[in-house]
Amino acid sequence: MNPEHVVAELERVGARRVLVQAPQGLRGIAIQLSEELSRRGFEVVISGGPCWGGCDLALNEAIEVSADAILHLGHTEFVKQSTIPTIYLECRYNHNVDVEQLVEKSISILHPAKNIGLGITLQWLNLLEQVKQALEDRGFSVFYGQHKNGRLYPSQVIGCDYTTVKSVESKVEKFLIVGSFFHALGLSMITNRSVVVADPETMYVKDMTQITKRILMQRYAQICAFRDSKRVGVILCTKPGQKREGLATTIVSMLRKAGKDAHLLALNEVDERFLPDEIFDAYVNTACPRISIDDNAKFKKPILLPSELMVALNLISWEELISSGNYFRWCVQNG
């Protein structure tokens, strides 16, 4: 991290009191940054709350501590409008990775495909050209696309947005995601191509097909259980990048027309500890779609995505949903 760049950005927005926000894995960097800025005369407050992505800005915390700006670590810009100036620090990994070994481990799973769609997470984006070249040196053709509104870098993927790789789907036989299991699973749920994950940190390489089938079976079981519900809570998240009030109110109306007793439920953290299970039989989640997928086992009641609700209400079939490539789409539209 370049302290001079950070200081220049803070001075550009006229900030002297700063809230530093970081995901758990970057809390050590947040401490180092706080110490450096304090030495340079800034007042620094470190956010102790969770940070799930660029959609999760600590705006309320910043207001409460009278911060002039937020330093948000580890993500690209997601929320375009903010009441407080927000500076995004990407925190890309720059330690040595044996890219040749990582690609070599991937080859047996990628074969016999020749045309590969390549996606990569922000932390490993500096490896993009090396991975691409290593694949091409082994006879593969490599494809990735641009983001439709420039919010992400070419080839970059995040947990709810795979535009850069979906845009080349028709050209490829398989996808390779350089990053974590989390990101590979998301893509695997919205494509009929095989997805291979290659994690540069652990050198873990795996085909996601069987895991994805198991997850989809679990999701269908949730849909079936939801159909028996009578009272449903429609979750409206208050995080700046996850608040979809229009979508949530539309879903309440749909549920009521379908004979359900539906209510809006406002939450900042969609956490099993805070859901009033004694009141509701099931939930529809309009916040981050990955909550329903990745945290499914934590919840005692069904917690569907809006797209899954369409199946539960018999508006589309399960087969139509999983073949559409739009599993997350209703959840990432603005309300």
Image (cartoon, rainbow, N blue to C red):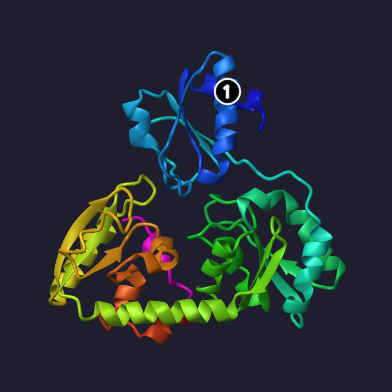
Extreme residue in the right direction: 137
Residue occupying image coordinates x 23% and y 80%: 227
Residue occupying image coordinates x 32% and y 60%: 286
Residue occupying image coordinates x 40% and y 62%: 289
Say above or below: 82 vs 182: above
Quarter of the image containing the N terminus? top right
Q: Position of residue 132 (x, y in %)?
A: 77, 61
Q: Is residue 143 left or right of residue 319?
A: right
Residue occupying image coordinates x 52% and y 52%: 149
Say above or below: 153 vs 82: below
Question: Does the magenta stretch mainly form a helix, a strand or a loop?
Answer: loop
Q: Position of residue 76 (x, y in %)?
A: 55, 45
- Which of the 4 image quadrants contains residue 180? bottom right
Quarter of the image containing the C terminus? bottom left
Q: Nearer the viewer, residue 201 or 134?
A: 201
Q: Position of residue 26 (x, y in %)?
A: 57, 41
- Disc 1 residue type? Glu
Tell me if I can see residue 133 in this picture.
no
Q: Is residue 251 magenta?
A: no
Extreme residue in the top direction: 41
Q: Nearer the viewer, residue 182 or 287?
A: 182
Q: Position of residue 249 (x, y in %)?
A: 21, 60
**Number of numbered discs visible in the structure rendering:** 1
The residue pinned by badge 1 equals 35
Q: Residues in magenta? A: 325-335
Q: Is residue 111 left or right of residue 155?
A: right
Within 10 Å of disc 1 (Cα), the crowding (few <14, some 14-19, many 20+) is: few
Q: Is residue 92 left or right of residue 61?
A: right
